[in-house]
Image (tube, helix red, strand yellow):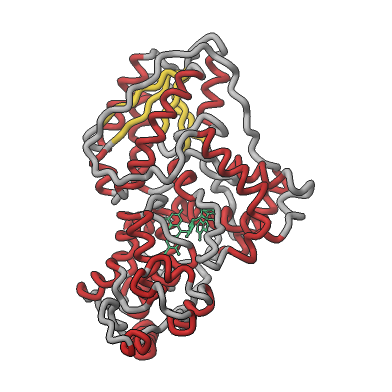
Amino acid sequence: SYAGVWFRGDVRLTANPAVSAASKVNGREQAIPALLLICPQQMKNHDWAPIKWDLLRRHLEVFAKDAAQQGILLSIEMIESWSMAAKAVKRFAQHHELTELHFNTEYPVHEQRRDRAVTAVLEEQHIKVQQHHGSLVVPPVLTTQAGKMYQKFTPFAKAWREYVAQNGLPVVEALPKRESVAPAKVPVVDYPVRDSSAWPVGEAAVRELLTNYVNKTVCGYADERDIPGLDSTSRLSPYWELGILSPWQAVHLLAQQSAQFPSGLDKGADTWLNELIWREFYLHLMKHVPRLSYGKAFLPHTDAMQWRNNETEFDAWCRGETGYPIVDAGMRQLAAEGWMHNRVRMIVAHFLVKDLMIDWRWGEQFFMQHLIDGSFAANNGGWQWSASTGTDAAPYFRVFNPTLQSEKVDPDGTYIRKWVKQLEDCPAKQIHAPAAWLKQRGRDDYPAAIVNHKQARERFLAAFKAL
Ligand code: FAD
């Protein structure tokens, strides 16, 4: 037998079950052929942000060298469309005379379809295909007693924890030392880039970020995670999205903090674990609810909503010019960094959907086009949660008041001042609704509120109730 690996959203060597499985088949003296396909057309179709591509591009330079040193004979190839994946994988497998191919499962419908096509073509050639669940701690096997997918997060999280308590964590296997091979060349790809150099790349550097976070910072997570001015969340999301890190590595580190893992953790670590479970929940949903892959709402009746979809207002939201400082700060952070604090993502999403009554899909797409961590599952989940078209948490009558939210999460205005330069010297008391303060100074460099929240709230509730 001779096994190869197809890398996709899992550009790492550690905690990668597809790599481990191929490594066992091949024995130490044989290299492991591996393939990675880049398809700019598909990146465009999926609204990959230029900064996300830049992060992957930079990471691939390091990854190609790391892989070569471990005896992984990687080739990175460009394809014009996804429909050519099967052909490219077949050519690769035949070239190396593989008898089996390993890869980690991707859950959305189109990825599943691509992988079925690849599998069919390889099996015709009598090449065995084996898929692994490398991007999840708990494979998508959790169902309710009635055999259905969990519709709500809380019971899902409970089942997730029970599964881990019973089955333990997936084992992270060290790769045996192999002779090094020549590194792959990273092809020049015609796709827009935006500088991502503020974000380290390479497995070793990123693993250090994770270790430091879990060992030093996570203890304060429960108290600090909702305060964007403190900026104390892990900022590891892009690494999970691209598969530079595995969630297995995170849970193993957390497990060192409690012998009864997944229970017995300190409050900070336990709250952070819960966020990792949210990530798994949305990936499970991708697998079990195919309509999500077609842009449909999780709650089908909400697809009848009559959105206002005012383009001028949408534009103001995108540019961070709504006149609601917390919303504008968030959108300006997104523009500047390609990332936004979770609490602020929720506030800007609520504002777009409920105050402006703009279709959540517009916001979902804009986020994908700009986020360095743009993830179909988490982004779709986050937008539908905020729009009240998704699973549990936000009932439609919960409409965030952007000013009250601002006072609550950014009491001294630190976050707003950082991103909205026009309000740099605005005192904390006025910064959340600065119209009077600006007027007193005869200033017109920051916009007036584009909508009256109270009226907008009534308008939204009436429309949603009619559904
Ligand atoms: P931490 O607070 O350190 O959390 C640790 C990890 O848990 C994160 O890296 C992430 O992988 C996961 N996580 C945390 N919160 C969530 C959540 N609510 N849902 C799913 N996973 C979570 N996350 C993305 O990774 N990509 C997206 O495209 C994305 N879009 C979002 C859109 C909206 C409207 C909302 C409300 C949330 C979105 N999220 C998305 C979830 C969350 O905002 C980010 O994961 C988080 O801000 C990333 O920062 P962090 O790594 O510092 O997170």
The answer to whether residue 231 shows anywhere in this view is yes
Q: Furthest residue to the right?
A: 259
Q: Is residue 406 above or below residue 213?
A: below
Q: Residue at x 43, y 60 (%)?
A: 340
Relative height, residue 202 to residue 388 (above, below): above
Instruction: Give the mark count.
Output: 0
Q: Find residue 43 and report its image quarter.
A: top left
* Camera-side residue of 440 and 174: 440
Q: Is residue 40 left or right of residue 405?
A: left
**Which residue is pictured at 41% across the width and 35% down the height?**
59
* Residue found at x 31% / y 83%: 449
Left or right of residue 54, residue 409 in this image: right
Q: Residue at x 70, y 43 (%)?
A: 167
| Front in this rendered view, residue 177 or 217 | 217
Q: Is residue 289 left or right of residue 220?
A: left
Quarter holding the C terminus is bottom left
Q: Position of residue 252 (x, y in %)?
A: 66, 41
Residue 404, percent across and down? 48, 82
**Is any part of residue 133 visible from this angle?**
no
Indicate whether 373 appears above or below 129. below
Residue 247 in the image: state x and y as whole percent: 57, 44
Q: Position of residue 284 (x, y in %)?
A: 50, 52
